Image (tube, grey):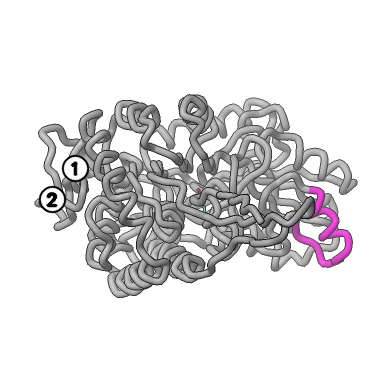
Amino acid sequence: MTSTHTDLPVAQFLGGDWVDSATTMPVHNPATGAQIATVADGDEATAIAALDAAAAAQADWAGTDPRHRSDILLRAFGLLHAETDRIARTITLEMGKPLAEARGEVGYGAEFLRWFAEEATRGSGAYFRAPSGGGRIAVRKQPVGPVFAITPWNFPLAMVTRKVAPALAAGCTVVLKPAPQTPLTALEFMRILVEAGVPPGVVNCVTTSRAPLVSAPIIADRRLRKLTFTGSTAVGRTLLTQAAQGVLRVSMELGGNAPFVVLESADLDKAVGGAVLAKLRNAGQACVAADRFLVHEALAAEFTERFLAAVSALPLGDGLDRSTRLGPVIDGAAVRRITALIDEAVDGGAHLHTVGPDIDRPGHFVRPAVLTDVDTRSRLWSSEVFGPVAAIRTFTDPAQALHLANDTDAGLAGYVFGENLGDTLEFAENLRTGMVGVNTGVISDPAAPFGGMKSSGLGREGGSTGLAEYQEMQYLAIAR
Ligand code: SIN
């Protein structure tokens, strides 16, 4: 079934069938506020139907050869590339990011398929003589079982492929619940997986505006073995509590509040270029986005001036317009939340530099803003911004900058710029974040372990350990 507005699929994908629902929900374009599609609004019955299908398909899928699973993932990689224009347009329509960034997301998202297609074929295990005697110890890996994957709206394709690709590679079946704001890209991806040869029931997709109604019964069902979630720390905590009942394996990619540190030895061209990427990719709506800028006092005035100039050169508008470099934020609630963070920081003494003309158009737009002298007690400093707003403070002593950088419960990403290699690497190593960009504002890479320390999450996605998140280890004690 397709929408009348777009030709995108709008039904749930359950057990290999497109299933209509009596209850539907609207999907909006954040750049205009207009409704672009109506999709099925899943409930408890849909959730259980999806898990039924995943559980029924689990044994057969786990029994397939790794090479077979790898070939399917590689076909999906090729199909995604072949459909880059169409998928990128869908991402822009429902999420708002500029088309060039959406095309970048298709490439990034597809790369998880290729990476895990390759990882699927790398067998691993152990066989050795027990130190205490003549027995043998053998260790093998097996798929953990049916997976429930809950994905966010900010990367509607890449956050899905980051979870679905390793699950399929490991031999797990999946129930996917995409964010209610961005179900269309996920449904497009289901169509691509079918075309690539994924059998019925191996992947299922439940779209819903009522997340707890769908999530709770799936997580409580003892057939589920793994929960993987990307989203806010608050929701992650609730899901962890639910998952504890079934002692589920979990992967949690939660909120960040990334420090961006410019040491005295930094090259300002690199630092400003890195700041634009780390802050304004996806209009700041990334969990790895730089939020707290700590700039050495000797460079602060010039850094701020050049950063403001670079940001004001980015045309703001509808992502479908090819000249746009900065799109809207996801919805009206995001506009209100970000505006409140700015207002409170200004009330607390921060100096506001807004960038670009007033926005006089429908849709959910926030003018980029840079604030200096931001109080560390303000919510702008201490919480995840998820918008195009940068808070800057200066420092003279790197030890003071390190203390401020680490003075947060979040520990996902951090960035440090400096040309003195020894000092810069030492600073990077002392940051309590799971990922650090050293002289770069871009850290995401399917071949690298993505994840956080402290309350930013559990586990790592991607990289050479990403497959293990979907595998169970079994040890065989073999008598002599
Ligand atoms: C995220 O914001 O959740 C992920 C960003 C990325 O993969 O770069």
The answer for how far apart the CA atoms under marks 2 and 1 are is: 8 Å
The stretch drawn in magenta includes residue 148? no
Image-based side of 266 in relation to 89, left or right:
right
Residue 251, horizontal then vertical, whole percent:
53, 43
Labelled disc at residue 3: 2
Q: Name the residue: 70% across, 36% down.
A: 374
Residue 361 % position (x, y): 32, 46
Report which residue position mark 1 lands on. Answer: 39
* Above or below, 346 relative to 171: above
* Residue 120 seen in the current view: yes
Helix, strand or loop status at disc 2: loop
Residue 267 horizontal side relative to residue 46, left or right: right
Labels 2 and 1: the sequence-earlier one? 2
Range of magenta residues: 416-430
CB within 8 Å, label 2 to label 1: yes
Residue drawn at (49%, 60%), measured in percent from left and top? 314
